[in-house]
Image (spheres, helix red, strand yellow):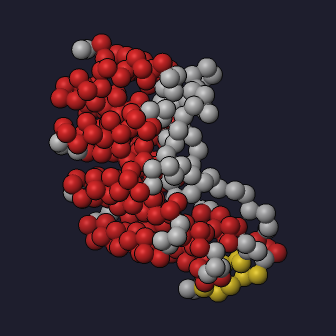
Amino acid sequence: MKKKHAIVIMLLLAVATLLLNGCSDELNSLSFPKSELKVISFQGFKIPQFPTAHDQLNFAKSGFPDSEEKKAAFEIISYIFPEAEVECGNAALYLAYMNFGYDYRFATKEDYYNAIKAYHDVISNYKGHPQLLVKAYWYLGWIHCDLLQEKEVGIQYFWHIVKTYPDIEIGISSPVPWVSLVYPLTIKGVKPAKDKAKRQWAGIALLEIIRHAHDKTEVDKAFDVLWKEYRKSVSTGLAIKLMLMNEEYAQKALPYVEQYLALDIANLYLAKEIKESAKEY
């Protein structure tokens, strides 16, 4: 039970990391000093106007002492660059997440529902941009499963990702954020080959289904799809490890342990923990 509790805590920490980093790629440095830019008065704040929507978005993602000023920095993007739908959509995703305040763990149910509405607005307003839509659906699944404890509702969003966006890659650094958090990959000689690991949103969605589903048939179905379509992913290794922590699901995962480890996707730590968990059976 202690092991199972520990893996759940680590995965929850991982989700928090994803939420903080998953809206877009890493920040790019701004090319223009603010002192040389036009300044616009917007919602009571003085906000510099950058030459491109991309630079404007990067500015909004930078640090602000006031959350209201940061919101204004995101909202001004659609005001200055209404034609830049990708940047406007990413700004909308950030604004949706800001409904949780400084730390989602202290958010209220009202905050949850405000965020849900905002993510649905992204889905309605950016239908032609699947990279934005898949993120909105992922956050909806997370809110319902982890925050509202409405597992069945959240799982449906994750299945929607699997069925509708099977090939969209995650626009963040490899590997999956929670692996960087739980298994430090800075030690020389323990990194998997970057070109081997696949990083699709659907793979993580299947892992979330396995983590939250109470029905064994649904867990087995999710793992079958994960193995068939995304076996060369860190998500598959984490799913095998998670299933080995539960006697009800362990027999399903056991036949795949050696096959997965032979792919050489798992780093030293994940591989060791999969092996140790499998030994118990």
Task: Report whether 66 appears left or right of 13.
Answer: right
Estimate the x, y position of residue 201 in percent, counting from the top left: 46, 49
Q: Nearer the viewer, residue 199 or 108?
A: 199
Residue 94 appears anywhere in the view: no
Q: Determine if residue 167 is in view.
A: yes
Identify the image quadrant of the N terminus: top left
Question: From the viewer's perspective, is 1 left or right of 81?
Answer: left
Is the C terminus in the top left, top right, bottom left or bottom right quadrant?
top left
Question: For the point 30% across and 45% down, which residue is it?
Answer: 209
Q: Residue at x 48, y 18 (%)?
A: 262
x, y percent for residue 120: 38, 71
Question: Residue 56 sits in which quadrant?
Answer: bottom right
Could you tell me residue 225's position as x and y percent? 36, 39
| 77 is higher (above) or lower (below) than 206 | below
Q: Residue at x 41, y 57 (%)?
A: 164
Q: Is residue 203 above or below residue 151?
A: above
Residue 82, image quadrant = bottom right
Instruction: Decide: is 212 above or below 148.
Output: above
**Nearer-the-camera pick, 266 or 203:** 203
Residue extending farthest to the right is: 36
Please, is residue 254 above or below residue 102 in the view?
above
Residue shown at the point (22%, 29%) measured from the top left: 249
258 and 277: which one is in front?
Answer: 258
Q: Locate residue 166, reporting x and y percent.
A: 45, 50
